[in-house]
Image: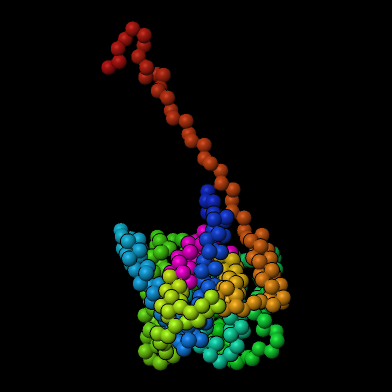
C-alpha cells in the first residue's frame, strides 16, 4: 500500500507548522477526554465495548450529513480511494479500539496503553522502511525521551502484570494507531478531512457492532444516571460528550493536523493525549497525577520538541518573479505620417 503522507514538503510549499500544532493539540485534548467520560459509564455498569461502540456510532451519525456535503462533486475520489477508506475504518478505528479493550481485559490498563502509544515509533520506522525517510539523531533522541516520559506518566514501574496475550492485543492496537497517523497524513486522496473521518467512523461503527453481535466484544449497557466529580448526569450526557467532542471533533482535527504536520510529527504531538487524559481525569473523576507522573508529562513535551527539531527542514519558499510582459514590437509600429492597416 503506497502512502503519501505529508512528511516532506514539496518545493514551493510552506508547511503550516504553527496552526498545525494548535489543531493537533486540539485533537489530542479531544481524544484525551474520552477516558474520563467513559470511566463514568463503565462504573455505572457499561462494558468498555458498549461504551466505545456508542461513541463511534454517535460520531458517525453526526458527521453523516457533513460527509455527504463534502463529497459532492468528489465521487471520483471516493471510488479511487475506496480501499484506503476501508483500511482506515477497519485499522484506524475498529482494530485500534477493539484490540485495546481486548488487551485491558487480561492485563494492566497502564501497560496496555503504554504499548499502544509506541505507535509514533512505528510511524518513524514505517516511513524509514517504506519510503527511505531515515530518522535524524534528534528524532531518535526525542522518541526515547517521549517514551521515557510515558513510562513515568503511566506509572507501570511499580509491578505491572504482564500477560502474553494482552501484549499481543496491545501491539495490534499499536498497529491500528500507527495506521491512523499514516493514512490520515496522505495528501494525494482529494478527500476532505471531514469526509475521511465520517466514512472511517461509519465503517468502524459497523465493524464494532459486528464484533459485538458475534460475541467477540462483550456488550452491556443501561440507562442509569452516571456519577462524576461535579455531580450526577443522565446516561446520554457522557455518551454525547464522547461521541461529539472526543470522537467526531477529535478525528476531524486529527486528520487535518496530520495533513498539516505530516505523520511523524503529528504522531508525537498526539502524545499530549496522555496529558489531557490526566487533566480530565482530575476534572471529572478527581484523580490527581503524582510527582512521578508530572515529571513524565514534562518529558513527553520535551520529547515532542526534540522530534520537531529533528524534522527535515522544508525548502525555503521563494516567491517567483513574474516575467515582464513583452511590449509592442517597434518594427510593427507604423512610420510617421502613415496609417496602420
Residue 42 in the image, given as x and y percentages of width and height: 49, 85
Residue 88 on image: x %, y %: 43, 73
Of residues 106 and 244, which is closer to you in this image? 244
- Give how far across and how far down residue 59 sits, in percent: 40, 72
Q: How is the image coloured?
A: rainbow
Q: Is residue 180 magenta?
A: no
Q: Residue at x 71, y 72 (%)?
A: 295
Q: Is residue 252 magenta?
A: yes
Which quadrant of the structure image shows residue 64?
A: bottom left
Q: Which residues are magenta?
A: 245-265
Q: Is residue 76 visible?
A: no
Q: Nearer the viewer, residue 145 or 283?
A: 283
Q: Position of residue 184 (x, y in %)?
A: 48, 67
Specify the quadrant that holds the C terminus: top left
Displayed quadrant of residue 121 = bottom right
In the image, taking residue 275 as reference, residue 211 lies left or right, namely left
Amino acid at each position: 500500500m503506497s502512502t503519501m503522507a505529508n512528511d516532506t514538503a514539496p518545493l514551493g510549499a510552506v508547511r503550516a507548522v504553527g496552526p498545525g500544532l494548535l489543531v493537533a493539540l486540539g485533537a489530542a485534548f479531544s481524544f484525551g477526554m474520552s477516558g474520563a467520560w467513559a470511566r463514568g459509564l463503565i462504573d455505572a455498569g457499561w462494558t468498555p465495548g458498549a461504551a466505545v461502540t456508542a461513541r463511534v456510532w454517535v460520531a458517525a451519525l453526526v458527521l453523516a450529513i457533513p460527509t455527504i456535503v463534502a463529497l459532492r462533486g468528489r465521487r471520483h475520489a471516493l471510488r479511487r480511494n475506496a480501499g484506503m477508506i476501508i483500511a482506515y475504518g477497519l485499522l484506524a478505528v475498529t482494530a485500534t479500539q477493539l484490540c485495546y479493550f481486548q488487551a485491558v481485559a487480561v492485563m494492566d490498563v497502564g501497560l496496555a496503553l503504554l504499548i499502544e502509544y509506541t505507535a509514533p515509533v512505528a510511524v518513524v520506522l514505517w516511513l524509514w522502511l517504506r519510503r527511505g525517510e531515515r530518522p535524524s539523531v534528534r528524532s531518535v533522541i526525542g522518541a526515547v525521551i517521549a517514551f521515557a516520559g510515558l513510562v513515568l506518566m503511566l506509572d507501570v514501574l511499580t509491578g505491572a502484570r504482564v500477560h502474553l496475550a494482552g501484549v499481543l492485543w496491545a501491539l495490534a492496537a499499536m498497529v491500528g494507531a500507527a495506521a491512523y497517523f499514516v493514512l490520515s497524513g496522505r495528501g494525494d486522496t482529494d478527500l476532505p478531512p471531514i469526509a475521511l473521518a465520517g466514512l472511517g467512523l461509519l465503517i468502524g461503527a459497523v465493524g464494532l457492532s459486528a464484533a459485538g453481535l458475534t460475541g467477540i466484544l462483550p456488550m452491556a449497557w443501561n440507562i442509569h444516571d452516571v456519577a462524576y466529580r461535579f455531580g450526577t448526569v443522565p446516561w446520554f450526557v457522557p455518551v454525547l460528550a464522547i461521541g461529539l467532542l472526543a470522537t467526531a471533533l477529535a478525528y476531524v482535527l486529527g486528520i487535518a493536523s496530520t495533513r498539516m504536520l505530516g505523520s511523524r510529527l503529528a504522531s508525537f504531538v498526539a502524545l499530549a493525549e496522555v496529558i489531557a487524559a490526566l487533566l480530565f481525569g482530575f476534572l471529572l473523576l478527581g484523580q490527581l497525577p503524582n510527582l512521578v507522573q508530572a515529571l513524565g508529562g514534562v518529558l513527553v513535551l520535551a520529547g515532542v520538541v526534540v522530534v520537531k527539531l529533528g524534522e527535515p527542514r522544508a525548502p525555503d519558499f521563494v516567491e517567483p518573479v513574474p516575467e515582464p510582459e513583452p511590449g509592442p514590437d517597434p518594427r510593427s509600429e507604423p512610420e510617421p505620417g502613415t496609417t496602420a492597416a
